[in-house]
């Protein structure tokens, strides 16, 4: 993407949101384009000084090009940096290889330590494949011990999951649930993505569905040529597809946007009579489209994963609630918890150089 297109995207986002606009760099490894990212962030900060918009920038990197210099920049310009890391060596080296096929664990562990030293609350993204599922609980325990507090676990839904590997995943999620209970009882503060939202969907049952994704409503993706799509996966379909909903120069085609939104709001297949539909993450149009080719058809793997995580999350909640665990109650029953956590995190972050 050219800087001119990126600047046009900032202006477009600023007009659209009339205030606070989140900008996420996506598509491959963003740090291959450090110079462009710096220029885009500086342009955004210039626009803020001129009173046109407020931007929150975020990057997820594989860590290969992460260094002190870029972190200095990210901290100075308030850019959130998250890193992908799959955990113990057996898991990390299985799929995360260098371009010439080499392992990355030894190479990237120091980068992860560096990130955590500078940004203790950085998110760490762990992707689980059928062949790395056996290491899931050990990997998350390893990352937690390393100091990672925001642990985001994401399943590779498109992988070749079998009954056997799903069975392993179920066992590992149960182990992870025990770790959640243990860490909470030890007073550790953390965010563990498979379970937090599920626990919250029990505690805040009546407003949970209101927070679900609404495809093409609150998020847009811009491709390098400036064409607009409802979310990241759809950029692959290209400007001539039904998923392109306009471009930066002429704006959003509202009829197309409304059609895509309406399609994504249809009752999902096979969810019509499911007892846990209100607590299920079946609304991600990106994921549904990527795995089934339709925004309203859910992947069977996602369906199984949702059922597994919900069962473990409910066990966690039941155990910690019965014990009246103070940290658990604070985290899930105190409406002020997110704000208090943010204040604490701001105090813990390394001062700007
Ligand atoms: S658990 Fe499966 S059937 Fe139930 S709502 Fe989720 S995806 Fe649909
Ligand atoms: S479609 Fe999926 S990835 Fe896109 S914003 Fe919604 S939940 Fe997120």
Image (cartoon, rainbow, N blue to C red):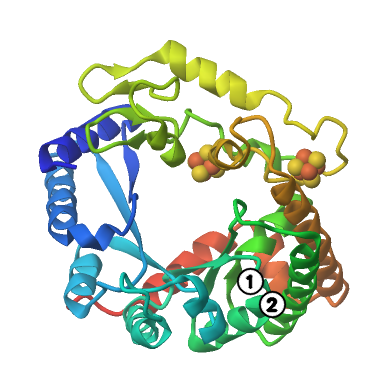
Relative depth, front residue between 17 and 326: 17
Residue 191 image offset from top left, x and y in percent = 58, 69
Q: Is residue 47 toward the left or the right of residue 152 in the image?
A: left
Neighbor class of circle 2 (other Cα within 10 Å; few <14, some 14-19, many 20+) is many
Q: Nearer the viewer, mark 2 or mark 1?
A: 1
Residue at image location 53% in from the left, 15% down from the top: 259
The answer to whether 294 is drawn above or below residue 175 in the figure is above
Residue bearing mark 1 = 131
Mark 2 falls on what kind of element?
A: helix
Quadrant housing residue 172 = bottom right
* The C terminus - image quarter: bottom left
- Tell me the distance, in whole angstroms, between the alpha carbons under discs 2 and 1: 7 Å
Residue 201 image offset from top left, x and y in percent = 73, 50
* The N terminus - image quarter: top left
Residue bearing mark 2 = 134
Residue at image location 38% in from the left, 71% down from the top: 346
Residue at image location 27% in from the left, 23% down from the top: 247
Residue at image location 61% in from the left, 65% down from the top: 129
Q: Are marks 2 and 1 in contact (CB under 8 Å)?
A: yes
Mark 1 falls on what kind of element?
A: loop
Q: Is residue 286 toward the left or the right of residue 197 in the image?
A: left
Q: Is residue 160 visible?
A: yes
Dot label at residue 192:
none
């Amino acid at each position: 993407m050219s800087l001119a297109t990126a600047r046009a995207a900032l202006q477009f986002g600023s007009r659209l949101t009339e205030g606070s606009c989140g900008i996420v760099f996506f598509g491959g490894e963003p740090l291959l384009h450090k110079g462009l990212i710096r220029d885009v962030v500086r342009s955004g900060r210039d626009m803020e000084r001129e009173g046109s918009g407020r931007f929150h920038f975020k990057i997820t990197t594989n860590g290969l090009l992460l260094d002190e210099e870029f972190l200095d920049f990210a901290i100075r310009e308030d850019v959130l940096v998250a890193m992908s890391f799959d955990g113990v060596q057996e898991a990390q080296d299985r799929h995360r290889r260098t371009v010439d096929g080499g392992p990355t664990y030894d190479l990237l562990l120091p980068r992860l330590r560096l990130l955590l030293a500078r940004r203790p609350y950085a998110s760490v993204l762990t992707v689980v494949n059928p062949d790395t599922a056996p290491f899931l609980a050990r990997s998350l325990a390893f990352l937690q011990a390393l100091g990672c507090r925001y642990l985001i676990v994401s399943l590779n839904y498109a992988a070749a999951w079998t009954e056997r590997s799903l069975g392993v995943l179920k066992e590992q999620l149960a182990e992870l649930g025990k770790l959640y209970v243990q860490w909470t009882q030890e007073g550790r503060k953390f965010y563990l993505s498979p379970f937090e939202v599920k626990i919250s969907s029990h505690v805040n049952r009546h407003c949970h569905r209101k927070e679900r994704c609404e495809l093409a409503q609150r998020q847009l993706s811009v491709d390098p040529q400036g064409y607009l799509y409802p979310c990241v996966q759809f950029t692959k379909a290209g400007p001539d597809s039904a998923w392109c909903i306009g471009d930066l120069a002429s704006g959003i085609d509202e009829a197309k946007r409304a059609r895509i939104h309406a399609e994504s709001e249809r009752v999902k297949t096979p969810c019509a009579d499911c007892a846990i539909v209100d607590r299920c993450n079946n609304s991600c149009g990106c994921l549904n489209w990527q795995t089934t080719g339709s925004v309203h058809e859910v992947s069977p793997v996602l369906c199984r994963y949702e059922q597994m995580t919900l069962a473990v999350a409910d066990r966690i909640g039941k155990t910690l609630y019965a014990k009246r665990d103070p940290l658990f109650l604070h985290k899930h029953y105190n409406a002020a918890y997110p704000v208090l956590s943010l204040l604490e995190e701001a105090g813990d972050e390394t001062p700007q150089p």
